[in-house]
Amino acid sequence: MRLQYVLPLFFLLIATHINAQKEAAIWYFGENAGLDFNSGTPVALTDGQINTREGCATISDTNGNLLFYTDGVTVWNRNHLIMPNGTDLKGDISSTQSAIIVPKSDEPNVFFLFTVDEAGGPNGLQYSVVDMNLDGGMGDITAQKEIPLISPVSEKVTAVAHANGQGVWVITRSYGGNSYYSFLVDASGVNTVPVVTNIGPSLPLGEYTTLGYMKTSPDGKFLVSLTDNDAQVDLMRFNAATGTLSDHISLKGFFDANRIAAGNRPYGGEFSPNGKVLYIATRYNLSQFDLSTYDQNTIIASGLVLKSREFYYKGALQMGIDGKIYEAIRYYGYLNAINNPNVLGVGCDYQVDAVSLGPSGKGILGLPPFISSFFYVGIEAENLCLGDTTEFKIDVSEPITAISWDFGDGNTSTTENPSHTYSSAGDYTVSVTVTTASDSTMETKDITISEIPVATILGDITGCIIQNTYNIDLYSFNSSVLDTQDPANFSVNYFLSQTDADTNMNPLENTHSFPMGTTPVYIRVSNKNNIDCYTTTQFNIIARQSPVIDTVSDWTVCDDDTDGVYTFDLSQKNNEIFNGQDETIFELLYFASQTDADAGTNALPFSYTNTTAMEEIFFRFQNSTYPTCYRTGSFMVAVNAGVLANTPNDMEVCDTDNDGFFTFQLSNTETEIVGTQNAASLSISYHNSLADAESNTAPLPDSFTNTTAYGQTIYARVQNVSDPTCYETTSFELIVNDTPIIQEVTGWTVCDTDNNGSYSFIFNEKDQEILGGQNPSDFSLRYFETQTDADLSQNEITGPYENTSNPQTVFYRLENVSSTVCYVTESFDIEVFDTPFALSPAPIVLCDTNDNGLQMIDLTQKNIEILGTQDEADFNVRYFTDRSDAENNTNAINATSYANTQTQETLYARVERIGLEYCSAITSLELIINPLPRPVLEERYVICPDSPTLLIDGGAFDSWSWKNSDGIEISDLREFNVEELGEYELTVTQNLNGITCENSIRFEVLSSGAPETMTVETNGFSDQIEVRVSVTGTGPFEYSVDGEIFQSSNTFIVFPGMYTVFVRDMLECRTLSQEIVAMGYQKFFSPNGDGVHDNWNIIGAGLFPNAQLYIYDRYGKLLKQLSPQGLGWDGTYSGQLMPSSDYWFRFLYDEEKVYSGHFTLKR
């Protein structure tokens, strides 16, 4: 007896919830995408409000009517409106499995909505309760909202029925680590204390280590957890009675070995309905694994990549209630499908773009998850083709005491694993009632018995082909193979072997290329509802080689004996027609008609004599072994008369650019060459050599430029158009003559020394200009009085020529000495001008406004004076600094902006006729720069208390103008008595060299107070003394202790010594001084004999000759009594050096004054 120890859950759950799959009949996911599975075929829904990158969940009632759906954050009711309390849940649209919905087992209108935060977020796994009795039956979340269970967790959650059939396990995985948490949901609600299993590898923390689905198998035996970033696939056994996991297997090795770029990251996973096959979607691959033997190496070895589509980013896998598994593709309007997921290998029928999501819907990454047990059916049926023996099995966890099968067609059985043969195709509902020691229940399953199609036998297909392959549209035979069978129900495929046909592997494409010879082809006709229901047959494709023909040239011969007939050897055409094809395979026959060629009768002999001047010969090119594989063609044979080539005149031209080359139209000689012959029957070609003309190679173009300068021989070939062998040659010359080139010839103007308007011209002086660079030996040049004489080459001017008018035009003719027809004529003008004169202008006198003796001068102001009555438009006036430069017309200066270098200069002006420079006259021009008058004044005058009046002398000039700061003139006298303080300006003028120049100078008049008395105080008795000065009088004042550096402060810090203190007003009207002594002492001394600070004394004490100075050590012992008038203390006591230390002194001076202090001796 076959016993499969499946947990009791599945037997009991299915018995209780026969229609439980309908709860998964409606899906909403991705970008406004949705599907309805109620009809048995998924139909696109366009009314969904969801827009989620990944996680989502949907639930329907047991009849397949939508109840509500969510993205883990927002909940929509069946009318696609947000539930009143259905917002701000703690899932996330970017969490892989952001939500799953679990019904409450004892209250059909109450559901537990579980949410999962993204990337190990703080909200972790939570649940909320949805009561469908709320909001008028539309449903709403109760006060039990966002109840935390565990945090943080990975983006994974799955649900599967408990083994007792009364509860559901909700399972998640820890964020990092290797902990799995199983929460039991039953009639009591959610048990918040999970069953924890630590198993498999620990995952590192990180956003991408949380990505990837977790799924349980429909029978509750297995759990798989996918980790996107680490390519980790963890497969484990699941105990639905205890919620624990065991027997970990890692499939990571398979994905590491089948990497496509970054595409080996596992994301979507799903089990087959029977729980024996696992499917994993990575970014670009879909892989299948056989779980029938639970062994890591065996499972990895069974791995098969079903489809690899790089750049098609795969997402979730989810089973539908139709038993198919669907696959999401990121931002794509279709889902892929696995149509037979229980079948291993390609027989699982993976279909790309299987389901359209409508005009606006797009899948992204996620699909809605459901309780895995929704999709478990305990009954298994195999061999579902009409005529096969169908075998049935039932999964039960306890020993069976009684069993009863109903096959849905009126037949029954009490055998545990019965077999049954159906008499007709169709849909049947199979039921089984099972009794065990603990319970008795019934389970049903719908099955379809499909017809086995008939494959009509085809005859062999034979074809004649010209290539090495025979291309046939195999699927054009489908209607013949199916005969009367409906192609909507049956499919036809073609294969190259019986094995491929039986396994449905490697079907041939619609149009297949078959090699030469015989190829067996196997036909498989399959029932589309069940491709395992099929029939095969076989036929042959026979490909036979047919020859290829190209266009065959006509055959024309030249009749050299004028009888009009010719004996042709037709075999001479064989090579042309065969064109390299194998002569052992093909043969060639010639015929007088197309009919004979098609029939292959009345073949002509190879030696054939024409009967008319032009005839058509037909040929048959055929396979020697299979003569029915043939091609036909034809060509013309003609007998033509001979030809004559007349010699034309040479072609001679005048060269326009004188390079010796010219483009000739060679065809202009054709009329002369053809003569009286029929031009239509002849063709003429031109060649560079006689050899080329004879061999009819390298013909020249009609528009031909000679390749040898100035002359070249051309050979003409005249041939019969029907027979190129009928030809004759001739030749002629191409001659290129240089054409004279007209140069730019200037007019000839002369200066008339006697001003009578006439001049004797020698025209040969213009020869070189007219010739330019042309060789005078190649051309002749003559001069004429009129254009007509030049054109007719008559009345040439010879010798000196005196003009007859002024101005006058003279004509010339320049012609090629080798060809007088190659000539040009042109003219130039002659004109006689009077000699100009230059008048002496007045000097240019300017004031030195720049105050440097230099000016920028426009000399052209003198042009009119220099030209006098001469027209300025006819003459140039140029200026020079040197007369020789003016005479030689070199180094002219800039007349409009001349900068002088001296205050007095003589310049020279040259008047010359425009266009005739040597016709000129010269004069001189004086340039004078007057210095500006310079009054001698100080910038500042001060009125001091000691001299209160101020009289200023303006100097010896022609005029004076004294102005105050407002610009008002207050005096025009030479001397100015200042009465007010302020700023003034003096302007003076002086006439020199005929012009008056002026200059202005500004000055300021100030007043100042002065110090009257001063006193000086010294403060402090140390190495730095403060000196403070007090002064009376009108300030402000400035102070100094050395008479050189003054400051505004009246306080100084000085070293002890004698000083002279000064005080003065700011404008230095008066200075007072006083000598002082700043008495003090050094803070330290170092009597080491180096001449620096070797003695210590009171500085400034010399002013007090009677003063006494006493030196003490730190204990008050008197060490030295001395007079300050001496050198001071040398740091000894009774001839002994005193140590480094502080010492005290007592200084008595100015009778009763005493000062005490201390200083330091340093050694």
Image (cartoon, rainbow, N blue to C red):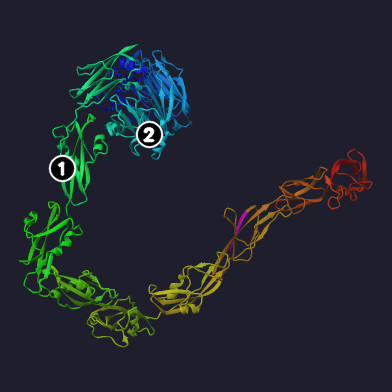
In the image, what residue type sits under mark 2? Ala
> Is-magenta flag for residue 734?
no
Graded by Cα atoms within 10 Å as few (under 14), some (14 to 19) or many (20 or more), the crowding at tag 1 reads: some
Q: Is residue 501 above or below residue 1077?
A: above
The residue drawn where x is 91% and y is 50% is: 1126
The magenta span reads: 983-990
Graded by Cα atoms within 10 Å as few (under 14), some (14 to 19) or many (20 or more), the crowding at tag 2 reads: few
Residue named by callout 2: 301
Q: Which of 895 and 983 is in front in this view?
A: 895
Residue named by callout 1: 460
Q: In this view, does 200 lie above or below 785?
A: above
Q: In which quarter of the image is the N terminus?
A: top left
Residue 73 visible here: no
The residue drawn where x is 28% and y is 34% is: 353
| Image quadrant where residue 512 sits | top left
Q: Position of residue 450 (x, y in %)?
A: 21, 27
| Image quadrant where residue 869 sits | bottom left
